[in-house]
Image (tube, helix red, strand yellow):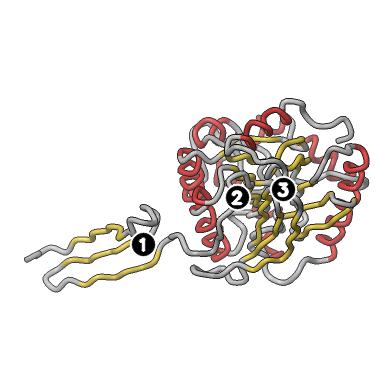
Amino acid sequence: MVSVPHLIRFRVSDANLGPASGYLVSCHLSCRSTVRVSPVVRPCSILSPMDQNGTLIVSDAHLGAAPLEHEDAFRRFLAQAADRTRDLVINGDLFDFWFEYGTVIQRRHFPVLHILRDLVESGVRIRLVAGNHDFWGGSFLSDEIGIELIDGPIRTTLGCRTAILAHGDGLGSGDWGYKVLKSVIRSRVARSGFRWLHPDLSAGITRLVSRTESRHGGTPDAESLGRASRLHTWSAEQFHASPDIDLVVLGHCHVPEIRELVPGRFYLNPGDWVQHCSWAEVEPDRMRVLRLPEAGPGSQTEVMFEVTFPAPPALSSEAPAAEAAELESQGPTGTL
């Protein structure tokens, strides 16, 4: 008999799915006990198996400004990545705002940081490309979480294919105002000055200037389609300048797409998690962009684009990381 009420919280998990599965159970115990069960982030069958040499690519999750149900879906998606790939690329704007202070992190991002750390510990290589919303990454992400930080464009290997990888902001002709702003806000002086702001104040300022929440729902607007067009042009230039490149992989415009710009060579954009809940899979024999039509648990996938091509010679499971390290050591091509 319990004479004083107590609140007990415990997790009921499926041993086959791991500790992230199941439900969080809150039990309020008194003389007459009651139990309330509420679902938490848990794996669901939204992903099919990938080739062991495949690369999973996501972009533009904009955590902190995306719809909450999309953020929940994105965390469920990430929690399953270790069962499908050893190579995960986050191609910019994982966060709608990220800044590394010396002793604090933003509490809203703790759940996804925990998932990313678990992925790294399970053997998944994670590369995070700096976007225009989260370019201030630093030692916390690299040393504490174990993520490789990239300030693209770079040449690398994705799913056994030679690729140019970049977020996409500031590429191509025009947009000179942003290019000047980009050089200023990414400078050491700007970083040092921003560090003097209280984290709550800096987060409030970035919420005021961010337009991400205005892009919830609907279809890509004229501005997004204009960005996509500029990225097509820039990608075609890279193909003509570098005959050995198979793919150009960009994000930024929130328009998921596979487009053959040169025979047998493709522009790939995995889309976003603000509107589309989409991602890309690059494997030796195919490349796809998929999405979740519904963001809730248990939603089935929908293939938006798919290309198949002859697979390269068989590679070991260590090959993608080894080849990528070799390519990345060369640095960006001279035309980038």
User: With 185 as the anchor, is 140 left or right in this view?
Assistant: left
Residue 293 locus on image (x, y percent): 62, 71
- In-front residue for pair 54/38: 54
Q: Name the mark nearer the viewer: 1 or 2.
A: 2
- In-front residue for pair 261/207: 261
In the image, farthest residue toward the left: 1
- Label 3 vs 1, first from the N-terminus: 1
Please give the residue where the numbered disc 1 appears in the rendered image. Answer: 22
Residue 169 locus on image (x, y percent): 79, 46
Q: Quadrant of the N terminus?
A: bottom left
The structure residue drawn at horizontal position 80% and vertical position 35%, both measured from the top left corner, is 183
Q: Amino acid at mark 1?
A: Gly
Q: Label 3: few (<14), some or many (≥20) within 10 Å?
A: few
User: With 213 as the anchor, is 143 left or right in this view?
Assistant: left
In the image, farthest residue toward the top: 329
Residue 35 locus on image (x, y percent): 24, 70
In the displayed structure, 300 sits above or below 268; it is: below
Q: Name the mark nearer the viewer: 3 or 2.
A: 3
Q: Secondary structure at mark 1?
A: loop
- Label 1 vs 2, first from the N-terminus: 1
Q: Are marks 3 and 2 in contact (CB under 8 Å)?
A: no
Please give the residue where the numbered disc 2 appears in the rendered image. Answer: 51
Q: Secondary structure at mark 3?
A: loop
- Label 3 vs 2, first from the N-terminus: 2
The structure residue drawn at horizontal position 71% and vertical position 55%, both measured from the top left corner, is 287
Please give the residue where the numbered disc 3 appears in the rendered image. Answer: 311
User: With 212 as the anchor, is 25 left or right in this view?
Assistant: left
Q: Amino acid at mark 2?
A: Asp
The structure residue drawn at horizontal position 77% and vertical position 35%, both measured from the top left corner, is 155
